[in-house]
Image (cartoon, rainbow, N blue to C red):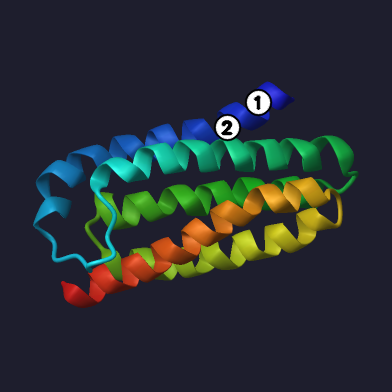
Amino acid sequence: KLFVALLLPQAVGLVGGLVTAPAVRQWYQFLHKPAFNPPDGVFAPVWFVLYILMGWASFLVWTRAARPFLFRLYLVHLAVNLLWSVLFFGLHSPGLAFLDIVVLWGMVTAMLILFRSVSRLAALLLVPYWCWVSFAAALNLAVWRLN
């Protein structure tokens, strides 16, 4: 279960990366970005670590909880996470991507609260992800407004 839990978010990240990479080179580089936009090379390593943390958190919940709803919520959240890359980079739609990231932020917030009822560590492992999605939402909004 640990292997699956760690691999699943990385697979989502890989698919998202396949959608993202061509757009970064062809479309994203020409967008106006806010001063707080990190260098492009920051995103992949940050997501790699965040996917490990969320995979570990999901493992703790999956193996300790007799509440399949929590793991299903996590799986749906992964789809919403992937959808952001499709909307922003695949469809070049920062506006739709912003709506998606607001939903994603709400889902991560709910997971953090609900995972806490199963494992304090699982909730703590999601805190960096929650912070990054909060930052990414602000960045997404700024890019949408500037363009």
Q: Position of residue 44 (x, y in %)?
A: 36, 39
Q: Which mark is residue 4?
A: 1
Foreground of the two, 89 or 49: 49
Give the residue at x 59% y 68%: 106
Give the residue at x 9% y 56%: 30
Kind of residue at disc 1:
Val
Give the residue at x 70% y 42%: 57
Distance Cα–Cα, label 2 vs label 1: 6 Å
Above or below, 106 relative to 85? below
Q: Residue furthest top?
A: 3
Give the residue at x 64% y 65%: 109
For label 1, count other residues whose C-alpha is less than 10 Å away and answer few (under 14), some (14-19) or many (20+): few
Above or below, 72 relative to 64? below
Q: Secondary structure at mark 1?
A: helix
Above or below, 105 relative to 87? below
Q: What quarter of the picture does the N terminus occupy?
A: top right
Left or right: 146, with 117 as reference point:
left
Left or right: 6, with 140 as reference point:
right
Q: Position of residue 22 (x, y in %)?
A: 19, 39
Q: Secondary structure at mark 2?
A: helix
Q: Position of residue 21 (x, y in %)?
A: 24, 38
Left or right: 63, with 53 as reference point:
right
Left or right: 8, with 1 as reference point:
left
Q: Are marks 2 and 1 in contact (CB under 8 Å)?
A: yes
Foreground of the two, 25 or 120: 120
Q: Which residue is mark 2?
A: 8
Q: What quarter of the picture does the C terminus occupy?
A: bottom left
For label 2, count other residues whose C-alpha is less than 10 Å away and answer few (under 14), some (14-19) or many (20+): some
